[in-house]
Amino acid sequence: MSSFVGHSLAAISIYSLARKSHQPFCHRLLWLFWLIIIACAPDIDYFVPALNSSAHQNLRITHSVVASLVLPFCTILIFVIRGFRREMLLKYGFQAILAGLSHLILDLLVGVTPLPLMWPFVKETFRLPFGILPSAARLDISDYYFYRNIFIELGIFVPLLCSAYPIFHTYPVTRRRKLKIIFLLACSSCFVYWAHTMSR
């Protein structure tokens, strides 16, 4: 499983790569915080015994497509009730859905824990035969692997976000910017390779 840092960075990326909103700063900050909650929400099974895999035949039911979209669709419903304009509804709804699904994508890219993606319709689990993200170590501030894995996640996601940002926001394409993007992608690739070579 990816760590809370990886999931939070995914939400921050989804927020940052979208076109800037004209909403007040506090509203934008609140929306970013909500996207982070959506992106991390499937891991609630660690804290709620009724949702834990031990209560569901070792299936992490919160890590299904249906479960990961509960909060996004609730968010969209609230926006509809509040009468959001179609443009804003599409923008924020799409970001919420991406944040929810990003959790499953990142956990799949770890390549360790099988996920019941089609639950409750099918109990079959899915796992990639490879991994390009580090598995989250236990939450222990004295554990070396906890910091190492977070460092690897930062090394993968931060350069990717920094290289994608000027592209998504249509910054002028200069030779210097191209070289910067190539360098950032190379850095990210090195960390991906490091994560890929780790034992699973």
Image (spheres, rainbow, N blue to C red):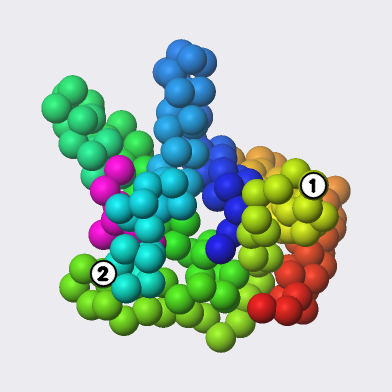
Res. 101 visible in picture: yes
**Position of residue 24 measured from the top left corner of the image (x, y, whole percent):** 46, 13
Label 1: few (<14), some (14–19) or many (≥20) C-alpha neighbours in 10 Å: few
Q: Which mark is residue 142?
A: 1
Residues in magenta, as a range: 61-71
Image quadrant where one finds the C terminus: bottom right
Label 2: few (<14), some (14–19) or many (≥20) C-alpha neighbours in 10 Å: some
Three-letter amino acid code of the residue under disc 1: Ser
**Position of residue 92 measured from the top left corner of the image (x, y, whole percent):** 35, 37
Type of secondary structure dominating the magenta stretch? helix
Q: Residue at x 31, y 81 (%)?
A: 124
Q: Residue at x 63, y 76 (%)?
A: 131
Q: Which mark is residue 119?
A: 2
- Is residue 22 one of those drawn in magenta? no
Nearest to the eye among marks 1 and 2: give it: 1
**Position of residue 51 measured from the top left corner of the image (x, y, whole percent):** 33, 55
Q: CA distance from mark 1 to mark 2?
A: 36 Å
Q: Residue at x 78, y 53 (%)?
A: 143
| Secondary-structure class at tag 1 | loop
Q: Do the residues under discs 1 and 2 have CB atoms within 8 angstroms?
A: no
| Secondary-structure class at tag 2 | loop
Corner quadrant of residue 137: bottom right
Q: Residue at x 26, y 69 (%)?
A: 119
Q: Nearer the viewer, residue 196 or 48?
A: 48
**Position of residue 188 measured from the top left corner of the image (x, y, whole percent):** 76, 61
